[in-house]
Structure formats: C-alpha cells, structure tokens
C-alpha cells in the first residue's frame, strides 16, 4: 500500500467516522476512533465521559502546547495536568495500535503519534454547516432547536483540542494532504477515493 496509515480530522456532523468505517470495510484495515478513548479509559481507570470533559478543558493556547511538549520530551509527564496525561496516553495508545500494522485513525491528533512514519495520509473531512446540522438531528438525535449550538460546540472543542496539542490551527489547509467535502461527494465516494489513494 502507498499509505499504511490514515489520520482523519473532521468537522462535527461531516460523517468522518462513517467514512473511516467504510474505508475500513473496503481496505480491510482497522479503523480506530472511540476505541482509542476506550483503551485510554481502561489504562487510566477513568470513565470515557470524564475523559471527554477533560478534553473540553484543553486550552487553545500555544503556550500550553509548548509547555506540554517540553514536559513530554523531557520525560516529566508525571506532573502533567489531567488533560496533558490523557493526551499523552491517547498518543501512546495510537502508537501501540500503529505498531500492529496499517490503521485508520479518527481524531485525537493521531498525526502527532504517527510523526515518525513517512506513510501517513492526513485527511480533513468537512461539509456545509446546514448539512451537518441536519445530520446531527437525523443521526445523533440532536434537537433541531439545539443543532446550531451543538455543531458550534463540538467544532470549537475539536479545534481547541487540536490547537492545544499540536500548536497548529485545526482548519489550517497546510496540515492536510487531502480535504474532502462529504456533503458534496457523499460518504461512499469519499471512502472510495481514500481507498484508491492508499492502495
């Protein structure tokens, strides 16, 4: 395969997880999203819901990113904040899964954990906000009145988490090799296109 790993970041409601699952079916390569959180939960003995709360607290500060990376690089992760420890454990879990063979990762700043690998396809999945709101209502059970706020909340959370842990803006085009509009292309076409690229 041309790419052994795919790291997907996605806007809320853009079907990034569904695209990863379709790509997994086409390629036979395992896809990991919530599974990373579940393993972190098991390793640290913290509920997944609590982990998600800690992630929401991750600051969108470049100074925080520098501080976090300096502590990790110097081996002083024992004194990290809860948010920092969770991020570090997520990265360890991703590295462990990647060591087992080709893999598809959704979210969790996976590209950082895969930084030493030269065969990672970095992808961003987006879609029109109205389509994402419709998906939130239809597939995630979000109230139509709350859809706008929920989409905004989760996009902000993902953007802040990515920026806090990478020092780069989440939607920065140069972070990715490929940006797909799932609203225009559809889930199947996005998965097909990614499969053609990785093989």
Image (cartoon, rainbow, N blue to C red):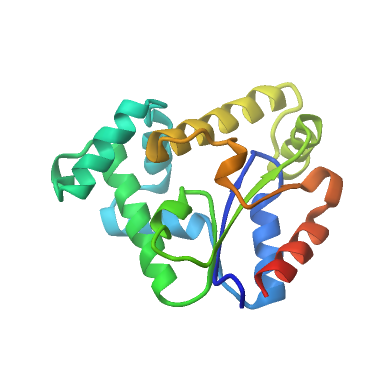
Seen in the picture, residue 81 relative to 89 is either above or below; the reply is above
Along the viewing direction, whichever of 2 and 108 lies nearer the viewer: 2
* Residue 13 appears left or right of 104: right
Count of marks placed on residues:
0
Seen in the picture, residue 198 relative to 131 is either above or below; the reply is below
Q: Position of residue 51 (x, y in %)?
A: 38, 43
Q: Position of residue 3 (x, y in %)?
A: 58, 70
* Residue 104 appears left or right of 111: right
Q: Residue at x 69, y 56 (%)?
A: 18
Seen in the picture, residue 148 relative to 133 is either above or below; the reply is above
Seen in the picture, residue 30 relative to 116 is either above or below; the reply is below
Q: Position of residue 107 (x, y in %)?
A: 52, 49
Q: Residue at x 22, y 41 (%)?
A: 70
Residue 96 falls in image quadrant = bottom left
Q: Position of residue 24 (x, y in %)?
A: 65, 70
Along the viewing direction, whichever of 102 and 198 lies nearer the viewer: 198
Q: Which residue is drawn at 19% across and 42% down?
A: 71
The quadrant of the rendering that contains the N terminus is bottom right
* Residue 2 appears left or right of 179: left
The quadrant of the rendering that contains the C terminus is bottom right
């Amino acid at each position: 395969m041309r790419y052994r790993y795919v790291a997907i970041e996605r806007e809320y409601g853009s079907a990034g997880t569904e695209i990863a699952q379709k790509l997994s079916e086409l390629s036979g390569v395992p896809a990991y999203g919530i599974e990373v959180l579940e393993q972190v939960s098991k390793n640290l003995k913290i509920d997944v819901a609590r982990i998600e709360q800690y992630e929401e607290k991750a600051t969108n500060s470049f100074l925080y990113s520098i501080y976090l990376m300096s502590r990790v690089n110097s081996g002083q992760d024992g004194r990290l904040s809860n948010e920092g420890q969770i991020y570090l454990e997520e990265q360890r879990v991703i590295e462990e899964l990647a060591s087992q063979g080709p893999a598809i990762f959704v979210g969790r700043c996976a590209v950082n954990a895969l930084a030493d690998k030269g065969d990672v396809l970095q992808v961003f999945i987006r879609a029109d906000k109205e389509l994402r709101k419709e998906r939130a209502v239809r597939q995630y059970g979000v109230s139509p009145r709350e859809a706008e706020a929920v989409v905004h909340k989760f996009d902000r959370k993902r953007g802040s988490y990515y920026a806090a842990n990478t020092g780069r803006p989440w939607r920065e085009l140069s972070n990715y090799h490929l940006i797909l509009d799932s609203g225009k292309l559809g889930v199947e076409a996005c998965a097909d296109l990614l499969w053609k690229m990785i093989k």
